[in-house]
Amino acid sequence: MLTLLGKVCDMISARGVHKSFGSATVLDGIDLDVSVGEVVSILGSSGSGKSTLIRCMNGLERLDGGRITIDDFDVSNPKQLAEARKRSATVFQLFNLYPHMTAVENITLAPIQVLKIPRAQAEAEARALLDSVGLGARSDAYPAQLSGGQRQRVGICRALAMKPRYLLLDEITSALDPEMTAEVLNILAQLARTGTTMVFVTHEVEFARTISSRIVFLDKGRLVVDLPTNDFFASGGGMANPRIAQFLAKMRKD
Amino acid sequence: MKFDLTILAPHVPFLLKGALLTAEACALALVGSLIIGLLVAALRTSSSPILSRAAFIYVDLFRNIPFIVQLFFFFYGLPEIGIYIDAFTTGVIALSIAGGAFSSDVIRSGILAIDTGILEAAEVSGLSKPVIFRKIVMPIALRTSVRPLGSVFINLVLTSSILSTITLNELTGSAKIVASDTFRPFEVYAVLLIVYASLTYLISLAIGSLHRRLNRDRMPDVA
Amino acid sequence: MMRYTSFTSYDFILLAQGLGVSLALFAVTTLIGLLIGTTWAIVRFYRVPVLTPLITFFAELLKNSPVLVQLFLVFFGLPALAKINVTPVEAAVITLSGNTAAFIYVIAVSAIESIGRDQIESARVFGLTRWQVLRHVVAPQAMAFAVGPLTGLLVNQLQVTSLISVIGVVDLTKIGNILNLRTLKPFIVWTIVGGLYYVTAKLIALGGARLEKRLRAHTAWKGL
């Protein structure tokens, strides 16, 4: 979309986002921009609101205040939400694969139905994606026949098949054991190298450090810091904040 | 009087014709009640309170009124409003409507059991509601409901015997004719009872294997 | 005489009578069915040889065949075989009781099985006889478990009583037939008849739900 000032809209933009469940405030005035080409990791302890923020970005939760736009499409506007969703794709913590479809069918469903890509082309692309994550031989397996790490790799392929401008990753390794986590993180590192824009909600601090351009720290629904990765880990930067120091210390111990 | 089955032998072809009619009626009613069941289950789980209320009333009514009363309502009532259809069609329609009420309950619980995460994944990928229902909700709900739907179908087969009361000579209707022709009602109805019981037993076996086939992908393979 | 007449106030009495017959037969056959069904379940609990598999087979046969055919077998078949006279009401009582018994048996068996075998065995270890275990350990728990499925069954069995109209018992459905032929107003007649069945079914369901709540409250209170 073009504005008078030219292209200023290549970003996910959150302004003053509020969200509460009942009397509990989960997000309390979040401002965050993610531009195309960035990898932004969102850290924070459980209950800090980081997953909810992702769920607000893809329209799974209704905002109670503020505004989120993806390339200028407002996710709170039902008509613009469809357009916003075409530009982003989500990978979930619990994979959420369609249990009655093979890996390829999982991946091709939305490209065929939403993007109207011909079936043959969609399937070829799906197989190529599966190949690239080392699952070429398991293309026709059902989710129940795959390990957790394999399922999540299919989940990533399913998101990538939509050719999203932004990849939203919601604690995608939290349900995996260390070995499987490594499988999945390797793929993310690959994606980061190829310039895929990612919003990465995670507990994997060390990994976030290696792939992120920026790190955002949430605490009790508020955005505490938003710093370039190096500054975040510098002793005078994010570490100066006691909540962050405490969080990082705890993460390293676990 | 002695229990003698040989007297039935000459009537077997006639009874088979009746059995065929039963099979046809049940097959059509199975399709009908599945279509109605899916539609009504979709309405009941929809976000519109009016639609879901209307669907509930339909299910509640047809589950709590005897089938024979429903059947008479259609059989005697439809000609009143100028709709003249034969007994077979009336029977299939009545069976489909009653079966639809029971199927919709089964399918509805199948739908409610679907992991919401799966539906969220479909939603954020931009799939429209009808596509989500057709491609994801329906196949998952139907697969998990094979066994309870099988019970509904078995009940449908047993209930189809009531179609004999609206002059339809399906299996029970033909047996009635044979019983009065031969004056051997005990043999005829005893055999009929066994035939129905064996039929439903075979159906339950078929349902079991269908369930295993459809849910194959739930089992880890060795490859 | 007129070929058909419209409704009269006397028709209300007819409908009430029909409903009365349906309810009476429903009540009687439910009681007999309960008695027979639980007896069968107790026979199974004692693992009586020969009788147990026989009962299971018979119950399966009754559950998996149309009630209408069972009704014909008793009403037309039994007199022909045994040279005895069976009235429509007798045939109705025999058939409905047997059918109800088969379903009660299944419910009772699963209710008993819902109580852990370890519970029964530990009671036996304490020296209780099998009968004492049944009375004091199994029965109270099984009863609370069974009320829910039982309510569902009774709602269903009320509807099944409508089939006895086919062999000439003047129940609610038969009254519907009579009024249908006389008035030639099928929509009105069958809507009223259906409505009466519906309300009765709802009352049974309501009663069952109340009883279940009470039984559960009772066991919960005793557990404290």
Image (tube, rainbow, N blue to C red):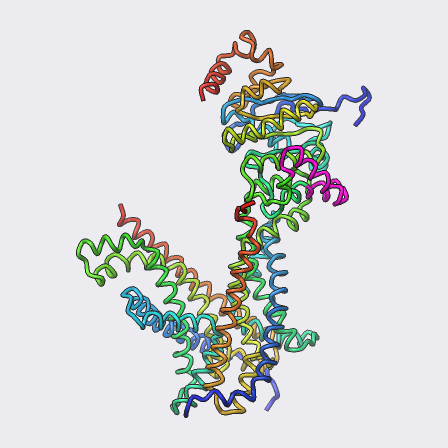
Compare residues B4 and A251 and report the one nearer the observer.
B4
In which quadrant of the rendered image does the N terminus of chain B lie?
bottom left
Residue A124 magenta: yes
Q: Residue at x 22, y 54 (%)?
A: C123
Q: Is residue A132 above or below residue B122?
A: above
Where residue A114 appears, as percent x and y from the top left, is 72, 41
Q: Is residue C43 visible?
A: yes
Q: Is residue B93 above or below residue A159?
A: below
Where residue A137 appears, as percent x and y from the top left, is 63, 40
Quarter of the image for residue A67 reads top right
Q: Residue at x 65, y 49 (%)?
A: B135
Where residue C224 appears, as percent x and y from the top left, is 26, 45
Q: Which residues are magenta?
A: A108-136
Residue A133 magenta: yes
Compare residues A7 and A175 and report the one nearer the observer.
A175
Viewed as shown, does residue C118 lie left or right of B222? left
Viewed as shown, does residue B34 lie left or right of C113? right
Quarter of the image for residue A87 reads top right
Q: Is residue C14 visible?
A: no
Viewed as shown, does residue C126 lie left or right of A217? left
Compare residues B205 and A171 and report the one nearer the observer.
B205
In which quadrant of the rendered image does the C terminus of chain B lie?
top right
Viewed as shown, does residue B64 lie left or right of A40? left
Q: Is residue A133 above or below residue B223?
A: above
